[in-house]
Image: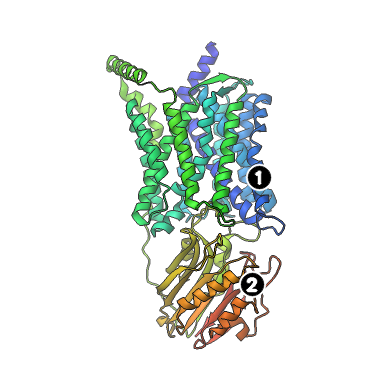
Amino acid sequence: MKEENFIKNSITLNFPWLYFSLIAINTLFGLQLINSFFSLLVNFFRERPSIDLTDVAIYALVTFLLVFPAGFLFRLLNKRMLFFILIFSISALRLCIQLCRWSPLSLAASGLGVLLWIVSIVFFIILLQERKIKLFYTFFPAFLFGFALNTAINGFLGTWDIVWRFEYTVFFLLIILIAIQTIIAILVSKNLERNNSYTDGSSAVFYSITAFMPFVFLQLYQFQNIAALNSITGLDTARSLSIIIFSNAAAIAFIYLIRVKLLRYIITVISAAVFVLAFWPPAPGNLYIIQVISGNLCGWWLLLTVFNRAASKAIVKTPWKNISASAISGILIFIFAFIYYGTYDLVLPLKGWMIQMIAAAMISFFSLLSVFLGFSLKNLLIEIMQNRTNKFKNEKKPLLKENILRYSTILIMLMLFILPALLLLPASIGRTYFQKKDFIRLVHYNIHQGFNIDGYQDLESIARVIEKEKADIVCLNEVSRGWVINGSADVYLWLADRLEMNYHLFMPASDLIWGNAILSKYPINLIKSGFLPRLDAPLRRSFIYANVNTGDAQIENINVLSTHLHHIAGDSVKRQAQVKALLEQWEGFGRTAICGDFNATTGDKEIEMLHDAGLIDSAVSLGKQNELTWVHYEPYGRIDYIWVTPDIEISDYNVAYSTASDHLPVALSLK
């Protein structure tokens, strides 16, 4: 008994920073594994010719269902052995997906990594239940810091996630993190018993731990999503990252300033309401910023309440309740993510924002249960009076030193939040100097959210393909600005910065963070933008129409329209309605180029409508109609076009072969 007490006290008093660092790095790796898993499911597995949405759902569901039998690990392995297996396996799998460029293995490694990460959270919750680590000063701030660290890294890298970067600096950083985690794990393991004695939570874990993974989904979807904040508010990456850093710092400061227990009950009720309202149909501009900051602050408070409930009662036994609640939590993130992104493939009665509100309402309800179930006002008042009495009796003790030690992790964490913000002063855009020439180079490219045909997000390859064509203006389709299943990157701003195209416009389609864009080295002015007829299609389509001031190129200005039509092969009627709407929006203006993925081939009615309107198919005009743009999957075809009005002189049509996207780019010189 004395030895057990010594171990317990030594961990509590001497190891908080080790556990803090370990949990923070483990959280960072877990979020990166989730990013890789969802993205590869959609952009690799889903894209295979014989795979449909049902197969994707089964793959994801089975992954989370496997958390249930993972409970046998707690029966078979002693605490120290299981600890090593979880920490080292997660690190190894994280390294694997960074080094591996074979998609099936990367997908499997990501799925296994997510599974083991969920089990590792259960392991740490068991340590909470055994009082070997503290929720308030170690586990919770470390968990929050892992999220904040992941967001900060993404922001400093322009939102293109580190997991997709095949670069030496990334490998070096990853190896350092794994080495640090390994050293810490070895040190911590000395204080873990070599026995199979674990604790399991009460039935409360089914309304506390269950909220964990849906909370992760909402964090990735909105509160830590720099790209979505960029897209919805019009801010740049530096400012959006600063706002999210501030919201994370505010959350941790707010939580640790609330010392009055009665006030915590009131705050939980208010937080539950604010958290749900944070997912009301996205408000524009500053209102959305308020949603992000207030929702993030309240969300972390709610998570603290459910973790506190999960850790409150426990008995010594195999942690089947902990494991089962965590497995259900994983299934819930699958359900919410699948339904939300499934609305773009299937016609469902729910709108996308409703899914997030339902998830937020569920978390809020679980938090209220965690706080108020068994609540007694009489007992609360007695406890408050006792605390005040104890505080009066102990007021002569050296509390300053005690508080500094207790809050040291929090104080340093706030410093780590604030310092990056000081480095985020956005660089000013200097004047672009143009080369004098008598033509401009226009490129149309459906970039598939930046994912190559192997399912990896490779924005650098996309940029190099465009650079090789010496593009002056680029019309882009399938531009993602924060979709979780597409790596949460702001592809629009990343490419604009990488290509040094300081003038750019974006028009969303099905939601505010996915659509069409125009990037330009020349000044551009929006003529109009809007949505195309939907006709009950699950995926809404849009267009963007702009005037490009090409004065420095010594040619007349040119109008450019970028669009992307309905994709289902047998739905020509829908595309015809969309083409009709496009022609009305064009209004017959001269010196106009219309670019897009029309999802139709020569001879189709929708293509003939463009011919009949007097537009010229540049490929046919230059004898390049046999250069296909859809070549990686059958049926092969030419479905990407640049149409021009007769008053534009065209030349040098080119379709460059590349695996950077599932489409090939179309390039054309204009005079």
Relative to residue 202, is residue 332 depicted above or below? below
Name the image colouring: rainbow
Pick the front one: 279 or 82: 279
Q: Is residue 406 left or right of residue 355?
A: left
Quick one: SS at disc 2? loop
Pick the front one: 667 or 175: 667
Locate the N terminus by quadrant.
top right
x and y percent of residue 57 in the render? Answer: 64, 48
The amino acid pointed to by label 2 is Thr
Relative to residue 665, is residue 151 depicted above or below? above
Query: Which mark, by number, is residue 620?
Result: none
First-in-chain label (2 vs 1):
1
The amino acid pointed to by label 1 is Ala
Return the residue at label 2: 629
Return the residue at label 1: 109
- Mark 2 to mark 1: distance in Å? 33 Å
x and y percent of residue 23 in the render? Answer: 51, 35
